[in-house]
Amino acid sequence: MDKNFDLMALTAFGIESVTKMELQKLGYETKVEDGRVNFRGNFEDIVRSNLWLRTANRVMIKVGSFDARDFNTLFDKTFDIDWDYFLTNDAKFPIEVSSVKSTLSSEPACQSIIKKAIVEKLKKRYHVEMFPEDGALYRIKVYILKDHVTIGIDTTGDSLNRRGYRTEISEAPLKETMAAAIVMLSKWNGDLPLWDGFCGSGTIPIEAMMMAKRIAPGILRKFAYEKWRNFPNDIIADERKEAKKAISESNVKIIGSDVDNRIINSAVRNAGRMGLERYIDFRVSSVEKFTPEGSRGFFISNLPYGKRMEIDANIYEVLKDKFDHLNGWKFFFLTADKDFERSFLRADGNRKMFNGRIEVRLYKYERRG
Ligand SMILES: C[S@@+](CC[C@H](N)C(=O)[O-])C[C@H]1O[C@@H](n2cnc3c(N)ncnc32)[C@H](O)[C@@H]1O
């Protein structure tokens, strides 16, 4: 229990500092690297961080970190790790290697050396010759960057953006983790109305309402560690119980509108899977018809772009017309369109991030609120 692990919360590039803030709020000391926030914790912390992190993709246990420029070193240092502390004798342990700017550049070769080293170590500890690998999954990820090797065991399973509520998606869905990150970056705190005028399958409104009601993002789903025989089960049950108790009431007004009525029906059903259908006001409406409800609020949207944008060529004109003189409201637009400010209005600031492989920016118009 008191064994403290080095843990890594993996994030999309550009939102590391948001995940860092989340971890700090959960009470951890953090160290940020590209695409990763390091922290320390025990089994309880593995459960808590997986259940509660809204913006990270996964939580890994860092089991090794060393320099290696040749296969012998890679083998020996991997062998030195206490693999039997983590892996049971029936563990399934696929290994994924990524090597960047390193002497050991062949990923398949590194993968087979690492596999061999782990098997040799387990043979020695479990006194058997064969491992059936028919038990729980312990996915091992190895990152080699500039000859430095980091080995992690994935505790999460399916990426954390898979909360379990969004089984219906729009044409260009925003990852749940990214939606949560932009709501956090807007500094909306659950008091003022929040409106997404291009809500698609409802990701931004649903994530915002989960924050307002303190619903743990992982409450509906399972995690890889739940199948691990050597993982304390009582902790898992206790943390889930705590998460259920933490859910609170909220009267905040959240509106999601979209021009496409089919996608609004999906958004309502997605919200329903989180028990939020009666908390979010979903409407079929084009942004041309937007009129603010209330003197202050947050308008946060992931704009259509690419092919769709050509169809809606005048959309920026409509937005300009709606927002240029709108006082009291702050607005935030996420788009991949590099000319966005030129076509719309000069922003107070913007932030680069990656939605999958697509470079996007969150344009902030916050001095009006
Ligand atoms: C990039 S998608 C939003 C995806 C959403 N964030 C999600 O996670 O599903 C853009 C959405 O804008 C909607 N849209 C396009 N033109 C619109 C308009 N003039 N008014 C309102 N919605 C519009 C599309 O139907 C589409 O669902």
Image (tube, helix red, strand yellow):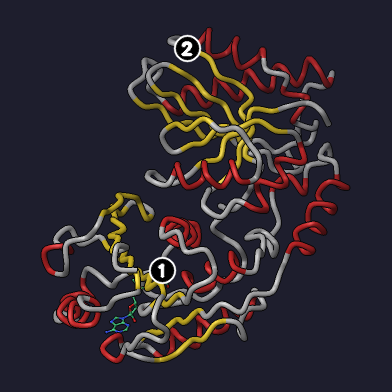
Image quarter for residue 320? bottom left
Q: Identify which residue is drawn at 65% across, 48% down.
A: 50
The residue to which callout 2 is attached is: 68
| Ligand 1 within 8 Å, label 1 CB | yes
- Position of residue 309 in the picture relative to residue 67 (left or right): left
Residue 239 position in % (x across, y down): 79, 52
Mark 2 falls on what kind of element?
Answer: loop
Q: Amino acid at mark 1?
A: Pro
Q: Secondary structure at mark 1?
A: loop
Neighbor class of circle 2 (other Cα within 10 Å; few <14, some 14-19, many 20+) is many
Ligand 1's image quarter is: bottom left
Q: Residue at x 58, y 64 (%)?
A: 211
Tag 1 residue: 173
Q: Nearer the viewer, mark 2 or mark 1?
A: 1
Residue 11, position in %: x, y? 48, 44
The quadrant in which the N terminus is found is top right
363 w.r.t. 357: above or below: below
